Image: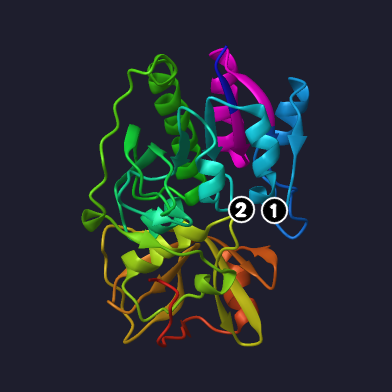
Amino acid sequence: MTSAVVFAYHDVGYRCLSVLLAHGVRVPLVVTHRDDPRETVWFGSVAELAALHDLPVVTPEDPNALVERIRSLAPDFLFSFYYRRMLGACLLSIPERGAYNLHGSLLPAYRGRAPVNWAILEGERRTGATLHRMVEKPDAGAIYAQQAVPILPDDTALEVFRKVTVAAELALDAVLPRLIDGSAQGIEQDLSRGSYYGGRRPEDGRIDWGRPAREIHDLVRAVAPPYPGAFCDLRGGRLRVLRTLCPGGECGPHPGPTLFLDGSRLFAQCGDGRLLRLAAVEWRGEPSSPEQCLERLGGDPLPLPSQPSAATK
């Protein structure tokens, strides 16, 4: 029976571990993470899935400390499905038939951290999932399967991530029989045609209203809940923008970035003069209707801050 040690976390980890089990792969060890109490946990638990199937589970701080244990298991494969720590060369060299990672982009584009969020932030109209051979350089090994999904103009990161999770399951399910029988063929990546991105911080969600409406819209989508959200600080409090809509490129009536009401709808005029509808906002941590928002802020129309910021790129 084919065996695999699995490093996994998040929804992609949950679904891809399910695929391995459905194909009869024996899993002698699952390596996952303890949930961070500071993080909103909105995704499936790999640890719970492993327990359901009576699979041994460990949650080490350093996965590379498991080299001898994993070597003693002599797995055919090693798989990493949204596991958050780097696996060293000693681990990658153990499985006789290779180590594979499932990455949430269409490699070689968006190598590195937070690929779904970055793809939305950069205004992409498609992304997907890639199964690739693991080498020491992150997300750089030969590609064995890819599955694309669309990014619609108003999709949030959560909505796109759910599509990518399905894409990951489909990609792995399609290629796994050929990995097991040895007939799968990889395609080397041309990294010069790709891109690499680092992690993101909550502070990166700060809105510079001097940017074009489409860029701000993409920022809001990229960091919308359950991620930390886009925000700006106004008159003694924080306005958190949870959902926006671009109403066809219409221009506003004000001389600069401005927050204002049009009937019962709340709009922001952005740095390019175009309008962005603020469909859901919070003021000082509480949901606020458009009327309540401007009443609490003390003005309609209300000038918006515009300053150099790393918020949108």
- The magenta region covers 5-29
Say left or right for 149 vs 237: left
Q: Which residue is mark 1?
A: 40
Does residue 45 appear anywhere in the picture? no
In the image, residue 183 above or below residue 290: above
In the rendering, which numbered label is found on residue 66? none
Residue plotted at (40% across, 27% down):
171
Residue plotted at (57% across, 76% down):
294
Residue contact at pointers 2 and 1, CB within 8 angstroms: yes
Question: Considering the image in quadrants, where does the N terminus appear?
Answer: top right
Q: Position of residue 170 (x, y in %)?
A: 42, 25
Does the magenta run of residues contain 8? yes
In the image, residue 250 above or below residue 269: above
Q: Which residue is mark 2?
A: 226
In-front residue for pair 145/182:
182
Mark 1 Cα-neighbour bin, 10 Å: few <14, some 14–19, many ≥20: few
Disc 2 is placed on an element classified as: loop
Question: Considering the image in quadrants, where does the C terminus appear?
Answer: bottom left
Say left or right for 71 vs 199: right
